[in-house]
Amino acid sequence: DAKTTQPNSMESNEEEPVHLPCNHSTISGTDYIHWYRQLPSQGPEYVIHGLTSNVNNRMASLAIAEDRKSSTLILHRATLRDAAVYYCILRDRGNDMRFGAGTRLTVKP
Amino acid sequence: SQTIHQWPATLVQPVGSPLSLECTVEGTSNPNLYWYRQAAGRGLQLLFYSVGIGQISSEVPQNLSASRPQDRQFILSSKKLLLSDSGFYLCAWSRGQSFAGYTFGSGTRLTVV
């Protein structure tokens, strides 16, 4: 899997939007961009994924740069329950997925 | 719908004792299966993955081993635990396609004393 780079930590205020960036300058044409989040003492949970076009689901939106070398996970209105470590991962046809350090999101009331 | 079960939730074992953690998946066939470990305050480390019965790929040399005796069963074992084996162990399953997401179990918190 290609490498991704994320900030170690970010802070947000409750009910404000949050933009979590991810750089993946060595992404290949067949890599899908996946985002997961891990709440304390739990396993990671799937958030969203995309290939080229922006994606929306009930949890978040994923904005993918035109050259695909970066992406941004958007939480439209952060809640205290969104405080977690967010992982950006590239997945190709390989059978394994490796997690980096992720971004620790703190949400302030 | 697919579900993944992992047990036990917590485990305290003495150094030198054996280990067996079990993970099962329901509602799907021929899943890819994975074992990850997360040390306290650290990221997830991929330990083993399997694309079929009896097929195990090891990522990190260590005193742990994995087996897949049945299509939807994945077992993590050790003959003699070390203090450094303490951590949060997570099982996951996925389809093999690059767009397929991973579903994780609830994890086992292992403390070796």
Image (cartoon, coloured by chain):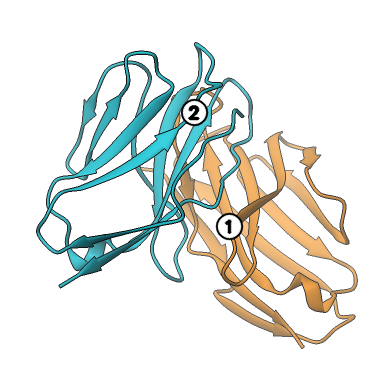
Chain colours: A cyan, B orange
Occupied quadrant, residue B80? bottom right
Left or right of residue A98: residue A79: left
Q: Are marks 2 and 1 on the same chain?
A: no
The location of residue A39, given as percent across then percent down, is 38, 64
Q: Quadrant of the N terminus of chain A?
A: top right
From this view, report whether residue A44 is shown above or below residue B18.
above
Q: Mark 2 belongs to which amino acid? A: His
**Which residue occupies 62% across, 42% down?**
B33
Q: Which label number is shown at residue B43?
A: 1
Disc 2 target residue: A24
Q: Mark 1 belongs to which amino acid? A: Gly
Q: Which label number is shown at residue A86?
A: none
Q: Are marks 2 and 1 in contact (CB under 8 Å)?
A: no
Mark 1 chain: B
Q: Give the SS element for disc 2.
A: loop
The location of residue A13, given as percent across then percent down, is 16, 63
Occupied quadrant, residue B76? bottom right
Left or right of residue A23: residue B63: right
